[in-house]
Image (cartoon, coloured by chain):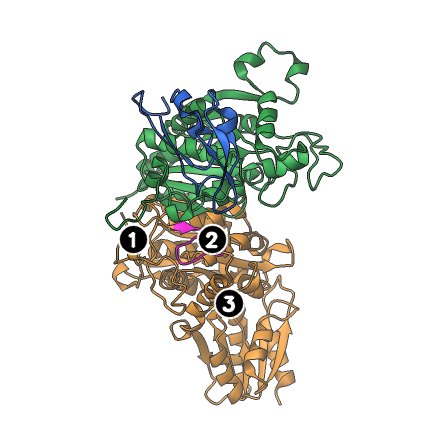
Chain colours: A orange, B blue, C green
Amino acid sequence: MSSGVKPGKYFVQGDEAIAEGAIAAGCRYFAGYPITPCSETSEAMARRLPEVGGVCLQMEDELASIHSVGAASVGGLKAMTISSGPGISLKLEGLGWGIKNEIPYVVVDIQRAGPSNGVATRVGQGDFYTVRYGSAGGNSSLIALSPKSTQEAFDLTIECFNLSEVFRCPVFLLSDETVGHTRELLVIPEESELKIVNRIKPSVPPEQFVMYPLDTPGVIYHPFPNIGEGYGICVSPYTHNSKGYASTAQDIQEKMAKRLVLKITENLDKLVRVEKQFLEDADFSVVAYGGNARPAIAAVEMAREKGMKVGFFRPIIVWPFPDGEVLKVAEKVKTILVCELNIDGQLSREVARASKGRAEVYHLGSGGVEPHLPVQIFDEIRRLYA
Amino acid sequence: MAITIIKDFCKGCGFCITYCPKKVYDLSDEMNKKGYRLPCPARAEECTECGLCDLYCPDFAILLEKTKKKGSIHK
Amino acid sequence: MSAAGETLKLLHPLVSKYLRQERMPHMACPGCGIGQVVHATLLAVDELGLTPKDTVWVQGVGCSSRITYSTWVGDNVDAHHGRIFAVATGLKMARPDMNFILFTGDGDCGAIGGNHFIHACRRNLDVTAILFNNGIYGMTGGQVAPTSPVGAVTTTTPYGNIEDPFDMCQLAVAAGASYVARWKSTDFKPLVNSIKKGVQTKGLAFIEVLLQCPTNFGRYVLKTSQPQEVMKWIKEHSVSRKDAKKLSKEELAGKYLLGEFVYRPERVGIVERYQELLKQHQKE
């Protein structure tokens, strides 16, 4: 089957770059439901997936999309779904199934202004906590990467697929309408330059294979056999033992919870990805993520021109939150200004927590619709800069 | 027909007793580990090997071995 | 007896061939009809020559699913409540070569899963779905179901159900399923034949089975805990399609029609249509 990779330079929206990244990563099943601002990804997948022999379905709703995506992965295909805030809320149940059964797949959230239906066509950043904590029951960790550009949307989509296979879990690409709808340069490299991680299969016969390694919670690169491979797999939404048999035993619940948390938190070294600019001599740092990083960087440059020692920090991995890297920044600077497109304060809350009081953390929030303007952030820097 | 009750699987529903056309089964005094009163084929000689008891049993607790007719129970 | 003097465990031949012995006896209540339907399914599987390598059992949530999940010796995929058809879609489109037998219930198929059910019928997804219709929500303790009869006293309709039930078979017919049938759990021969026919039919095969729930439907609706009484009620409230023609509208009220409702294997389903689409558009 064709790899579907089309090397070259393109002038496309982030939404489309995500589709190309998925195909390059080997995604061969996509299911989605139309929702602004990411229907463009569904439309691109509908054109491109059949070209590479993949399955693309517009399902009857958001739930059907994510449940069929998890199932397609159980069926042996790399799979992806996409939505925006209101649809992500609906998908959280399906996400739980994927987390619980350690099923690799990718979920993309192109955030828009909220709450509820909000403003469909305009940017927001209100799902930061939703993707991490929205699925019922806790007892799990989550990986989420966030791109700031069309190029990163392509690159990080591939990263998300790779991480999902290594960690055997659903992985989020947490993006936003700014990135989703901005048209800019995308360079797709030659196929040989791409690093793709494929599904790991068992090397032992079925009677020796442990489907869910509850006794080795921190282990990654654990094989994922699929249906029809003779392993008699059992997948269930209920708490289950290492074979997949439903259980009400407290010790099984404990082991399962630890497995789902520790496999990610004990392997942070494989996950941390951040961007740092001008931090070497900084005593003030701006923090932002996703599309809102662009005006933040511009504001930092404006501040530098005025002689202020301002730096910039961006978590590329937003979950698990890069506590260690944030603490390093907090120990260096006196003040941190977090610029995000929500009024309630989500990223800023994490930054404040991870800073452990080593720096003053301020939240510059906006309800969304427009990203911050560089001058808005610059004015706030100036106001706070001591 | 050779009739064996798989005692650990029986849940004492009584379908074999109720629905056997020849009233082969009775409720016995024997209980399994879970406390269900087991049936017993008290009049096995009346059995016509129809196989209905096996089909009625929801728990795969009746093992039949045809001694008279050939072929699968279902036929 | 083995050489060591240990008694070999006696097992029903279908159990030793197709079910995980560590999961037996299954968890159904005494007298529940689900075991009868599982028995019929295994007879169908056996007669068709299906194997654990080529056949997946798919479940949702409820008695239908908890009892059948991880009993089949092959692959078992248990979905969230109501999502069984969405999960089956992903499984089948990823592995169109495999057989999928779905076990679903009143709520799983007719309430929370209703939307996915009708769309799976519309797409004519090539799977065999067996609906365990016991007229109540069993697993959660006896709440009303969209298949509960009018007037039924349940834990959430203590004054009697004021809603009409779905005719799930008519829904399946209207939505486009290739093969639709309804039987009682004790219609052994027709049920086995229907399941076989369903597996062999391209497109969605929907087989509704009326079965007794002595624990909840029996106790709450019929005021009896005797499974035989519930089975008697089901028998009295069902009539074959053939015999129904002789009955008046009044006589038919509140009765379930048994038999085959539609058989249209010529209706091409999504699996074949998608394969056709790939033939036209797949490059290299």
Point out the image quarter for the N terminus of chain B.
Answer: top left
Front residue of A1/A280: it is A1
The x and y percentages for residue C39 are 42, 33
> Is residue C114 at all visible to an observer of this figure?
yes
Amino acid type of the residue that numbered disc 2 sits on in the rendered structure: Ala
Task: Give the CA distance from mark 3 to mark 1.
Answer: 43 Å
Q: Is residue A333 above or below residue A122?
A: below
Element at label 2: loop
Q: Residue at x 58, y 14 (%)?
A: C244
Front residue of C111/B18: it is B18
Amino acid type of the residue that numbered disc 3 sits on in the rendered structure: Gly
| Residue picked out by circle 2 | A246
Say which of marks 3 and 1 sits in front.
Answer: 1
Label 3 close to label 1 by CB (< 8 Å)? no
Front residue of A181/A257: it is A257
The x and y percentages for residue C65 are 49, 43
- Dominant secondary-structure state across the stretch colored magenta: loop
Element at label 3: helix
| Residue picked out by circle 3 | A290
Q: Quadrant of residue A209?
A: bottom left
